[in-house]
Image (cartoon, helix red, strand yellow):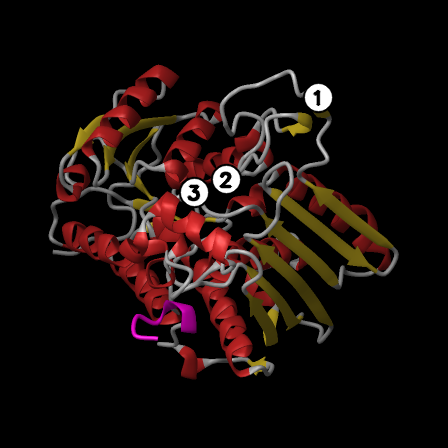
Amino acid sequence: MGRELNDFAAKKKRLRVGFIGSGFIAEFHLKSMINVRNVDVTAVFGLDPERCRRFSSLVTELGLGDCTAYSTLEDLLGADDVDAVWLLTPNHTRLEVMKVIHKEILEGRSKVFSIACEKPLARTIGEAREMVRLAEEASLNHGYLENQVFCTPVLRGKEIIWRRAASTTGRPYLARAAEEHSGPHSPWFWQGDKQGGGVLSDMMCHSVEVARHLLTEPGADRKSLRVKEVNGSTANLKWVRKHYADKLIEQYGPSANYHERPSEDFARGTVLLEDQDGNEVVIEATTSWAYVGAGLRIQLELLGPEYSMEFNSLNTGLKIFMSREVSGSEGHDLVEKQNAEQGLMPVLEDEPGVYGYTDENRHMVECFRKGETPLETFEDGLAVVEILMGLYRSAEIGATVKFPIEDLTNYVPPVARVNA
């Protein structure tokens, strides 16, 4: 039993959202919803019942609706008060979750008409294409949750550059993007087969997409930039050292064994693209799990013929100093992935806003509520995975990879191969 697109999606005064996943990133998205209008969080499903109960209580505490914690995914999808779902489960589970969503909709047991999926869309090109196919076949309005595209400095910076500078002196031609911190917060992130790789998969998905976005003319389709070739390299800088590999096992258990099965903790990528007029533009991206500073650092640059733009997330307006006499437990109350509790500390007073989660979720809610296509869709998620797999292949063979890359549909990065 199929249905036409938007059978259930007549313009809604309020969008009722179900969360699939109740972990760290789900809570981050939830807190950003405080500043999103026309939305109620009505449902949650996850594998940890206690976590789901806490999530449901937090929804009430934040005044975001009456949230039911469901014991099965099917029950959540069949609820009468769920219009859209946010897919926020670990990477290795997303395709199976998507298959259940597809089945429940096509067999008439679910009225869900929209879906937003956390980055990256999938672990391989084949998986990503299947995610797109399932969403389209189920007539879902789909959005790809790439928060850095919606960062407030990115939105403002791109608007100014293209309006004031590019319009008079020519389009930007080089975008640099870097993201780095001291390492992931959950065991599965450290496991190549579950995560789909290492830091390149985990974080360069942000860097290549925000850079591609900055280089794309406002109002133009993202496909107006065609990838010509990519060149990548990876390294194991910190977490393979005995002391740190031992710490990983101590903290996350034997599944995070970097003595035997490490994933890369540093990656570099260069992406050469061409615009519709034949002009070449370049993305330079670096990512690292080996950065020790105040916390998560995002650095962006955009360069053109007579102008440049730059942003560093740790160059905050608010800073706090605490001497040696100030003591307390470890926390992440000043900045994500915080590495210290003393000294001169930058403070991100609104992390969901600065990182883009608030505007991202506001955009998705309004697009789903009105039946409009989001700025970022599963197609963009697929394009990102194609670039990432090209970079992994380039790093593996030590050579530049030319696009298109149809032969890499089922390519799995070396660190993600189960029997490697």
Q: Does the magenta stretch include residue 178?
A: no
**Which numbered disc, 1 or 2, marks the residue closer to the eye?**
1
Q: Which residue is drawn at 20% across and 29% down?
A: 69
Q: Which of marks 1 and 2 is nearer the N terminus?
A: 1
Residue hosting label 2? 360
Callout 1 touching callout 2 (CB < 8 Å):
no
Residue hosting label 1? 321
- For the question of whether residue 309 can be seen, the reply is yes
Q: Nearer the viewer, residue 399 or 300?
A: 399
* Amino acid type of the residue that numbered disc 2 sits on in the rendered structure: Glu
Q: Which of 293 and 124 is in front in this view?
A: 293
State which quadrant residue 281 falls in.
bottom right
Q: Earlier in the sequence, mark 3 or mark 2?
A: 3
Query: Where 83 sits versus 333, above or below?
Result: below
Q: Report the number of numbered marks.
A: 3
What span is in magenta?
414-420
State which quadrant residue 41 falls in.
top left
- For the question of whether residue 116 can be seen, the reply is no
Mark 3 and mark 2: Cα distance apart in space: 23 Å
